[in-house]
Amino acid sequence: MEVTRKSFKDCLNLVYAAIEEADFLAIDGEFSGISDGPSVSALTNGLDTPDERYTKLKKHSMDFLLFQFGLCTFKYDQKDSKYITKTFNFYIFPKPFNRTSPDIKFICQSSSIDFLASQGFDFNKVFCHGIPYLNQEEEAQLREQTEERRSQQANGVGTPSFISPSSKGPAHVPDEHKDFINRVVEKVEALFVGTDKTVDLEPCTGFQRKLIYQTLNWKFPKGLHVETMEIDKKERFIQVSKVDEEEKKKMEQQKLEKEQGQLNDAVGFSRVIHAISKSGKLVVGHNMLLDVMHTIHQFYCPLPEDLQDFKEVTMCVFPRLLDTKLMASTQPFKDLISNTSLAELEKQLNESPFKAPQIEAAEGFPSYNTAKEQLHEAGYDAYITGRCFISMANFLGSFLTPPRAYVSAQSKLVEPFYNKLFLMRIIDIPYLNITGPDLQPKRDNVLYVTFPKEWKTSDLYQLFSAFGNIQVSWMDDTSAFVSLSQTDQVQIAMNTSRYAESYKIQTYAEYVQRKQQEKEKLTPASKSWMEDGWVKSHYAASGASGGFGYSRALRKRSGSPTVAEQGSPEAGDGWSNYSFPDNAGSKKMKTDEVVESKTSEGWLKTSDTKESFGSSPVLEGDGADPVKDTEGTLSWQQASADAAVPARKSQKNKKKKSEAAGASTSLFEVPEVW
């Protein structure tokens, strides 16, 4: 369902109802650009830290506009074993509410606009009929102005338009405007003696309107209602009405109520995001970090400078997020899915060992045919994203005994993927952990090199030619990361460059330490996030709730793994050289059913850790068999492609499963690294 400014008001209750009844929500956004300077490869450097990636995206991507927002709600029909969808495609544009409302400036990237145009994107619907919006600070300022006018009206002062610095005497009228004002006064005097109730003055400038208000307020303190009107071409004129005091108060009240209604309209699309936030429902996206950042930035508040503050704000706005690109990139899906782009992912999830979900559009909503791709229409992309999530979630049910064809969005099987957003091109930090510390790879084989601006990649390859295969990741015109194939080569490279004049080499650890020192110099030690004015005013909560009506429990931090002290540098995919800090421990989630391994590789594995849910455990090794313990707890283990196919069973596993079946309650957990 397409929603523009003309239809938004009528559709809003329909949107609210769809969100309220949904089991989960899928979202997607289309933007006017991606990067205002760096190339995409520089913006998403393979050796970024999460903090660096966030800082770059905030600096180079937030001046673009999110001008189409797709929302698809999914509700499971238990009776017919199918999902019912309601898809909304919102066109968004920050049309100014009035002369005092924000006049938003944004930029466009020609390649992005050209690409969307090639996909049939209708820009007229954005710029001519886009839904306006205000963030919380803008809304608060405008409501304060409206309340101030209401207060003045209640005190008999009138609207601010009537206020004159010389209200006790005649307003000063410049000589060049005296004839104009005299003609206005004559028309108003004629109104008093005539039978007409109103008179429309000729269109004039803003300064002339001010003089009219001041003059009429002084010369005719009673019996008149004066109001600025606007015609379709945005031409403004003043309408003067002959009224008694009771009518005047009534008309002033109607004017304020009209302004209040216009203000509610100006909040516009932000009301949809507020409804999503208040629902607390799982929000699913594909490669959704930019979607989340733009949504918060445009419809809630400017993004904070610090990554940790961004995580706090995100958890207040969206307490449960799930990224299907990360889900598809991890076990047990990693070995079964060769391409995680949205279009290709949807195709692969329709084939064995996966099953295409049964989905039907609700009456009055668009029914998409995936054979006729409508990619880069935000509503369709949101629909495909939700469809992919359902397929992968249901696939997890095949590992249960007995197998389950349907796994809900609230299942404990899905929870391990919550609040981890995919980070593009970073092999050893594949996700941003919204609810806790991020992965901390050692990167002992990485060097930070600074050099003259004239250098090219070939110069770096020549410089390190004695060290075999290297990988170059450019930072800017004068610096880059160079990854060596062997860790023991780092010291040799450092020694040989000690007396170099044209370039300088640092270890990755030295680079990180320097960046941290620079950050500490820029950040006042006494300032905390909760002490920051805009954060406190928008996100402080009373009692036991923690922002936007959510329990603080939803914002509880969980531990995240750090690089193992003795991790092996030969790890095949860079995802296994991690461990948990000692104080994080291995924590678990309770499930309502016994979760048992159905694979010979032992994808699910029992453990005897007894801590409560909050973080994920350390990976305990490949190919381990499930072992029942008295607590009936279970852990995920990395599974190969063969292990992920439930048809393969071993007699040994069957015996283990029969032992585990006796437990009344089990705990399910997934490692931070797969």
Image (cartoon, rainbow, N blue to C red):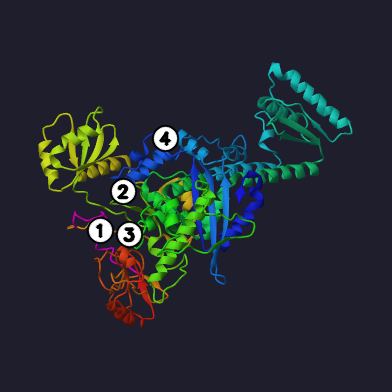
Q: Nearer the viewer, residue 240 or 121?
A: 121
Q: Nearer the viewer, residue 639 or 313?
A: 639
Q: Say which label, 2 or 3, has the lower sequence index.
A: 3
Vertical comparison of 192 with 534: above or below: above
Q: Label 1 vs label 4: CA separation? A: 35 Å
What's under tag 3, amino acid-wise?
Asp
* Residue 198, position as x, y percentages in the image: 82, 34
Residue placed under numbered mark 3 in the picture? 335
Q: Which residues are magenta?
A: 567-588
Residue placed under numbered mark 2 in the picture? 426
Q: Nearer the viewer, mark 4 or mark 2?
A: 2
Question: Mark 2 packing: few (<14 Cα in 10 Å), some, or many (20+)?
Answer: some
**Label 2 secondary element:** loop
* Residue 488, position as x, y percentages in the image: 12, 48
Q: Label 4 vs label 2: CA separation? A: 21 Å
Question: Mark 3 packing: few (<14 Cα in 10 Å), some, or many (20+)?
Answer: some
Q: Label 4 vs label 3: CA separation? A: 36 Å
Q: Nearer the viewer, mark 4 or mark 3?
A: 3
Residue placed under numbered mark 4 in the picture? 36
Find out whether residue 274 is within the magenta segment. no
- Location of the C terminus (image quadrant): bottom left
What's under tag 1, amino acid-wise?
Ser
Q: Say which label, 4 or 2, has the lower sequence index.
A: 4
Q: Say which label, 1 or 2, has the lower sequence index.
A: 2
What label does residue 103 carry, if any?
none
Predominant SS of the magenta segment: loop
Question: Mark 1 packing: few (<14 Cα in 10 Å), some, or many (20+)?
Answer: many
